[in-house]
Image (spheres, helix red, strand yellow):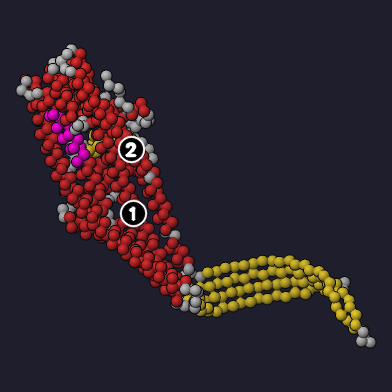
Amino acid sequence: MHGSRMLRRGPTGERLRHELKRLACNFAPPAVFLGKIMRTTPRHLILTLLGGVLALGLAASASATDFLQVYQQALQHDPTYQQAYANYMAAREVRPQAWAALLPQLTATAGKTWSHSAGDGGQIGSTAGGNFYTYNVLSSSNSDGEQWSLNLSENLFSWTAWMNLKAANSQVAQAQATYEAATQNLILRTATAYFNVLAAVDTLQAQESSLKALTLGLTQAKESFRVGLIAITGVEQARAARDTAAAAVISAKQALANAEDQLEVITGRQYDSFAEPGADLPLTMPNPANQNAWVQTSLRQNLTLIASRLGADVARQNVRAAFGADIPTVSLVASRSYSSTGTNETLFGQEFRGLGSTSNDRQIGIEFSLSLFNGGADQARIHQTQYQAMAAQDAVEQAARTTVQQARDAYLGVITGIANVRALRQALTSSQTAFKATEAGYKVGTQTEVDVLNALSTLVAAQTNYATSRYNYINSLIQLRYAAGTLDPAQVATINRWLTTVIRVAPGQMTPESMTPPPAP
């Protein structure tokens, strides 16, 4: 099981610090029935119960796979990114193809032939006295020949070819912008999947800690019922709460497995440990600290928006190229050809040799071509490209609005993220102080068992919310730079330096046994 392998080793102080961070904030429902149990249970057993909840540790590892390493593996193995690279390389070949239509075209042909024919034909003759008669003429022929030719053509003027070249330049630029956008999107997708795994680990550990506490509570309830301190109702309430927590653990394990699978789709592998943000995570305001400035930067530099604008340029060039069907084209043509044949014939049994011919031709000229009518196909093509250009321009407007929204949302995410991290850090400090005070009051009898449990629930919620707020802050930073078109591997390295704490993630085989918590005692 994921959680049991993650929560076993480590120094006591470190275990306590990490466990308070991982515990779930769903202790309020058990407070009702546990309060009944705790009021009838010796104090040293109550402290043992709480100690069992808090003495869960994280398995420390000598090293962890950090965010930078995961990103580097994503660069090598992510199919979406590899597909974007292949599409970019393919799109680059559009330009030389467009240039080819404007460069000289030279073709050559050569061949050699052999032929044989034989037969007879009826003829009518006449004698000197004027009498007619018929006779057959027997003949045969053998011939061979060879020929070759060179043909050269050069476009002197072709409106369509020149417009296609301009469109090709825009297509290559669009492909490059799309590829660079895919490179930045890979960082965004990797970060999202990476921190989703960390959040899933937090949730699983919280649910497992809650389950362990409720299992201990069920054990104490059974013992209290055995000695007659509580009714059977208290035992059933404890069992119901414990079973609910067991179901929550199963759901958390599934969520963690799904998060790991989503990261594996990008990187092609699973991991045993990760690095997560340390206590010294820096909270820096965006520079410049002005939302409108980031919006304007995004409108200039967002790569998806740039690719959309270049796509609109391609569509406009296609419209111009379509009008070329109504414009004459002028070409220079030249050719050189040679042919030679040799023939031997046999007639009335007599053979005649050396019959044949040769030719050596040269041609040069200028050709003028204009399509007069082709059934309306040219006009239909013009209308088609015009509507495509309209759609491309609308796509630019949609991309611009989306970019503005992304920039604004990401900027607000960073600003509120900083405020949330600071507020929840203070809430965590207050919750730690309150828990210690409540625990001390319980030891001297001024606080009840329910007060201790509620204080623990508040502390767990504060620690979990604080951890989540840091993930949200980092993701917002990445999203802001992605919207502005300035996200690069240097930012990955910067974020990676903030991840200084090792967390164990042990992906195991998903079986009913590994997914199901131990049965209730």
User: What is the secondary structure assignment of the residue under circle 2?
Assistant: helix
Task: Report the residue at 37% width, 38% height from top.
Answer: 269
Q: Is residue 189 left or right of residue 237?
A: right
Magenta stretch secondary structure, dominant = helix
Residue 3 versus residue 164 in the image, above or below: above
Task: Report the residue at 31% width, 56% height from top.
Answer: 304
Give x and y (percent) for residue 156: 47, 76
Residue farthest to the bottom?
129
Residue placed most toward the observer, 57 or 29: 29
Q: Is residue 455 left or right of residue 211?
A: left
User: What is the secondary structure assignment of the residue under circle 1?
Assistant: helix
Residue assigned mark 1: 180
Q: Which amino acid does label 2 sit on?
A: Asn
Dot label at residue 258: 2
Give x and y (percent) for residue 515: 33, 29
Residue farthest to the right?
129
> Quadrant of the rendered structure where residue 160 is?
bottom left
Dividing the image into 4 quarters, which one contains the N terminus?
top left
Tally the numbered discs.
2
Residue 421 versus residue 101 in the image, above or below: above
- Magenta segment, which residues? 454-470
Marks 2 and 1, Cα distance to the nearest angstrom?
Answer: 28 Å
